[in-house]
Image (spheres, rainbow, N blue to C red):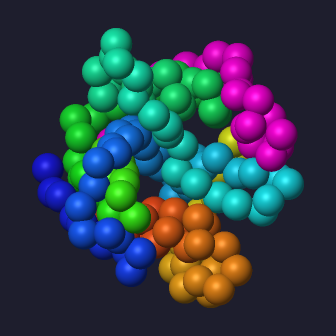
Amino acid sequence: MRSIEIIDNNYFGNWDEERTACRCIVVKDGMMLLSYETKTDQWMIPGGGLEDDETERECCIRELAEETGYIIEPSECMLEINEYYENLRFVSKYFFGTVKGECEITLTDRESEVGMTPRWISVDEIAEIFSQHEKYSDTDEMRRGMYLREYTALSNLIK
């Protein structure tokens, strides 16, 4: 497993808070499964926070089912990206997944508010969207950081 660090300009130099998330790249016939926020026009690789009582692979399975309605079989962790912002270390663990079935989508309140929906989009198109991360540097720092992370992941995992 590879590990990459992204250190933001606003990093304080040490961290005392940490959050770990597991994300899953699902590709079929050149199309990639993504979560799309219809009200914010924002894309992301599906996944989310690791809970205390679950393994990383279990987190992947749960998050993909909740956000996309697909039951997946995840690989072992292929990439870890450690991002440093202010006093926070944000760890994203990336897996590949194979669709094994379908289930009901169960979004959080926030995900429902932003109109999150699963979408299949070409790998080339999503790489282009994520490559535009710098255009958000003056207007949407959260999106800029997320798109940089996702672009970094795709650049290292999808050849």
- Report the residue at 32% width, 69% height from top: 12
Residue 95 percent coordinates (x, y): 33, 42
Residue 49 percent coordinates (x, y): 45, 34
Outermost left residue: 1
Outermost top residue: 53
Viewer-nearest residue: 88 or 69: 88
Viewer-nearest residue: 85 or 41: 85
Extent of the magenta region: 94-117
In the image, is residue 30 above or below residue 8?
above
Residue 69 percent coordinates (x, y): 65, 26
In the image, is residue 74 above or below residue 20?
above
Image quarter hosting the C terminus? bottom left
- Report the residue at 80% width, 46% height from top: 114
Viewer-nearest residue: 159 or 131: 131
Residue 137 location, quadrant = bottom right
Q: Answer with left or right where residue 156 lies relative to residue 67.
A: left
Q: Is residue 128 visible?
A: no
Residue 103 part of the magenta-drawn span: yes
Q: Answer with left or right where residue 88 lies relative to residue 47.
A: left
- Report the residue at 34% width, 13% height from top: 53
In the image, is residue 8 above or below residue 120?
below
Q: Answer with left or right where residue 111 lies relative to residue 90.
A: right
- Report the residue at 36% width, 54% height from top: 88
Residue 6 part of the magenta-drawn span: no
Residue 129 percent coordinates (x, y): 61, 74
